[in-house]
Amino acid sequence: MSKSRGRFGVHGGQYIPETLMNAVIELEEAYNHYKDDPEFNRELTALFNDYAGRPSRLYYAEKMTKDLGGAKIYLKREDLNHTGSHKINNVLGQALLAKKMGKTRLIAETGAGQHGVATATAAALLGMECVVFMGEEDTKRQALNVYRMRLLGAEVIPVKTGTATLKDAVSEAMREWTSRIDDTHYCLGSVMGPHPFPTMVRDFQSVISKEIKQQIMEKEGRLPDVVLACVGGGSNSIGTFYHFIEDKNVELIGCEAAGRGIDTFETAATINTGRLGIFHGMKSYFCQDKYGQIAPVYSISAGLDYPGIGPEHAWLHDTGRASYVPVTDDEAVNAFEYLSRTEGIIPAIESAHAVAHAMKIAGNYDKDKIMVITISGRGDKDCAAIARYRGEDINE
Ligand SMILES: *Cc1c(COP(=O)(O)O)cnc(C)c1O
């Protein structure tokens, strides 16, 4: 077992059973080969642009800027991508890579169903078989996404183990991959798991910060002062941060789901409440109980409801390069409503966590400062749940 590869400080590595070693080595070799292959990159760029609708817009939120009375606010509109979130960036990259590797079958885990839908979409497009593992609890809460995945030709397998939610779906997908690596690629949905996933997924998502940099140079002629994104496993946020990491004057802020608050047990704020541990093939910070068992986590946002965080974020936190702030359900719901009303943009409840923190701090910056917030997805999927949160029962 190799624990030295894919390290971010002490974090990352490959903490996996011997039976999975061949699969990750094959994947790492293929990725190292194709990532610099001009033909692969041409094909991926064509999929990004013609199929997913990239580049996504960088939009000046003038009303929000004026209302908050501080930094000039831009929104990076990943919600405008095909399938409605940033997840498609990673999925198109991995599906194309799997196809080049001669794989014919994609498996994936999903929580709320966003990553499962994106994977089923890519599988349909590239003519691959697709199986999605989803906690049984989540299949009930997200019946519409289960229907979408089946409509796209995927098989959805409800996972009954553990708490029957996202972390159990990841475990089950890893188990399935172990038993069938010859024709199957595990399309992991965030910057987590064993190396090379955190690096590979980050590279596919880094198109977000690459575009922000070009777009803000065109619009403002300089780099932003602060960029914000929400953090679940951490893929839209690392994609937003990546090309700014070396630009030391650009402040990087990740917004974690605090749920009912970081002083309660109903939280998913990993950096703010977690401890160092090993789970799902990586060393990083995890929410744990006093015995070191992975703790059940809670957030109103299913996409942020994961007990860990990608190893590169753990390292950016350790080195102080990025900061990670908790945002509660209440604050996120307020921001969800605020952005809808103020800019006519209904954000995913995940993305609303970043909007909420921006609302708190924008006024602390002078008017000549520039802030970019990544809107990781659109909020249509959340409307019924937020209505319920406000005491209104609507039919989905
Ligand atoms: C899945 C998801 C997230 C959380 O995942 P990250 O890997 O942290 O980006 C955030 N926003 C949306 C819209 C999602 O679908």
Image (cartoon, rainbow, N blue to C red):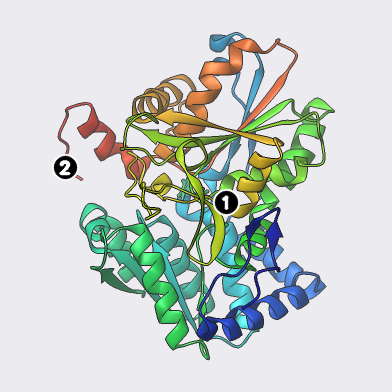
| Nearer the observer, 204 or 121 | 204
Mark 1 sits near ligand 1, with its Cβ under 8 Å away: yes
Q: Quadrant location of the N terminus?
A: bottom right
**Of pointers 1 and 2, the one earlier in the residue sequence:** 1
Tell me the number on the disc at residue 235: 1
Tell me the number on the disc at residue 395: 2
In the shown orientation, is residue 373 left or right of residue 178? right
Q: Position of residue 352 (x, y in %)?
A: 45, 32
| Nearer the observer, 276 or 106 | 276
Q: Is residue 100 above or below residue 367?
A: below
Q: Is residue 6 above or below residue 292?
A: below
Q: Secondary structure at mark 2?
A: loop
Q: Position of residue 306 (x, y in %)?
A: 41, 50
Tag 1: residue type? Ser
Q: Position of residue 224 (x, y in %)?
A: 75, 28
Tell me the number on the disc at residue 2: none
Q: Residues within 10 Å of mark 2 (few under 14, many from 20)?
A: few
Q: Position of residue 386 (x, y in %)?
A: 28, 33
In the shown orientation, is residue 83 left or right of residue 388? right
Which quadrant holds residue 164? bottom left
For image coordinates 52% across by 17% down, the residue present is 360
- Is residue 65 visible in this depiction of the protein? no
